[in-house]
Image (cartoon, rainbow, N blue to C red):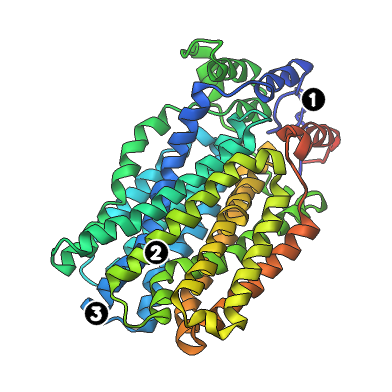
Amino acid sequence: MLVKDSQTGSLANEPSHITPHAHEVLAQLDNSGLSRFHWKAMITSGMGFFTDAYDLFIIGAALTILNPLWHLNALETSLVASTSLVAAALGSYIFGLLADRIGRHAIYGLTLIVLAAGAVISALSPNIYFLLIFRFIMGLGIGGDYPLSATLMSEYSNRKDRGKLITMVFSMQGLGLILGPLVALILLVSGLHPDLTWRIMLALGAVPALATFYLRRQIEETPRYALMMHGNAEAAQQTISNVTGNGTEKKSAKVQKQQTQQPKKSWFYLLFTPRFLKWVIGTAGAWFLLDIAYYGTTISGSLVLKSLNSHADAVTNMLYTLGIFVVAAMPGYIVAALTIDRLGRKKIQCVGFAMMTLAYGLLALVPGLTQSTLPFLSLYALSYFFTEFGPNVTTFVYPAEIFPTMIRSSAHGLAAALGKLGAFIGAFAFPYLLTSFKLPGAMGVAAVVSLLGLLLTIFTLPEPNQRSLEEIAGDHELLAEMKKEQVPA
């Protein structure tokens, strides 16, 4: 609830007045072209997702070594594969809240430090118990990267290219998907001792995170946060001038001081008001359903391929995995980035979920497809293409666009947290599904959750394409409503 300040007549902890000049400041950003700053911010944010993907999915390759080395049972295998995903859910929620409370810039680099530390100590684990704890720590950093990177890129983007820029940040995940199997292949054929091989696999995940930390600390607070949360038009104008190349990189001490002032009010409750609850259900629910199928089939990819051909060795299955990522997953990311600002988010998400349902459904219902390598791999690759050119990208983009500035990062963190809970369920359950119901049963579950994702998208989500963030979420109208609300302390 809002409290009116008796001295100023404004609402306590409320952002300053959004004046006509403030509208003009944000319009400059919305109508600007792509600049060098946009590409720098995209790469800086995207390197986090490159690292996230590598760290999350390399554990599947490491488990092919750890299973015989540590004699893991089915429960232990599932826990190792999924622990970091539970932590990522928690990290997304916590860091999402913090980014709205104290600012995007203040904690932007912290997620990488947590991630890198977790990767290094995971590689030093003496047994499964330490490995589970250290992978949990790493997962907190991975989760935190989702709302921070998405929100920062969204709030710095222009209206015309916003979908492409956010998609390209997330698409760096595709490079991590490719690097993981490639590193695993090199290490598997290197002749190194197995106990050293898996440790190197995990430790390498810290390298790109640490290399990107300095660049992240150079990214200033977003102009939208400075303006909408602090009413600081001067700081926002200076930052936008830097973004568009029309200003100097150096700020005055006054602007810098104003920009770092922190709000004390949390607006998290707004997510559960009728105005936004439908979108919360749509973004978080679609992400949850997607990740059950996506992480279930990806982290358990080596087990899926083993179910297809039990006689194939680890190197052969890793080559299959690498081939699928190169010919299907990465092209899906690229096509999504090239078309999202023309086709729109909703159409791409619906088509993606529909094609995933079709591919998984055929694998579940036609027994011969799971008994022949080429037909299976073709449909499996098709599902990957339409996952990336579909909901794996758009579920990341949506919550960064449709919620107001004061709860944007919290909303994204909540959606990502639900997604990672789905990922945990998928990664934990698929090894059991493959054991109990074989490959068709596991693919059937993936088909059902994909169909549910399609229906949820159709009935809950709007189309934010080519609209300003403030127009989509109604920031200005929301602030005006808040100013009218006067409640005694």
* Mark positioned earlier in the residue sequence (2 or 3): 3
Q: Is 452 above or below relative to 284?
A: below
Q: Quadrant of the N terminus?
A: top right
Secondary structure category for the residue under label 3: helix
Query: Which of the 4 image quarters holds residue 304?
Result: bottom left
Which class describes the residues within 10 Å of circle 3: few (<14), some (14-19), or many (20+)?
few
Secondary structure category for the residue under label 1: loop
Secondary structure category for the residue under label 2: helix
Q: Amino acid at mark 3?
A: Pro
Which class describes the residues within 10 Å of circle 2: few (<14), some (14-19), or many (20+)?
many
Which class describes the residues within 10 Å of circle 1: few (<14), some (14-19), or many (20+)?
few
Q: Residue furthest bottom?
A: 436
Report the residue marked by disc 1.
9
Report the residue marked by disc 3.
68
Q: Amino acid at mark 1?
A: Gly
Residue 141 visible in the displayed image: no
Q: Is 263 above or below relative to 231?
A: below
Q: Are marks 2 and 3 in contact (CB under 8 Å)?
A: no
Find residue 285 and report its horizontal and vertical position in percent: 67, 62
Q: Quadrant of the C terminus?
A: top right
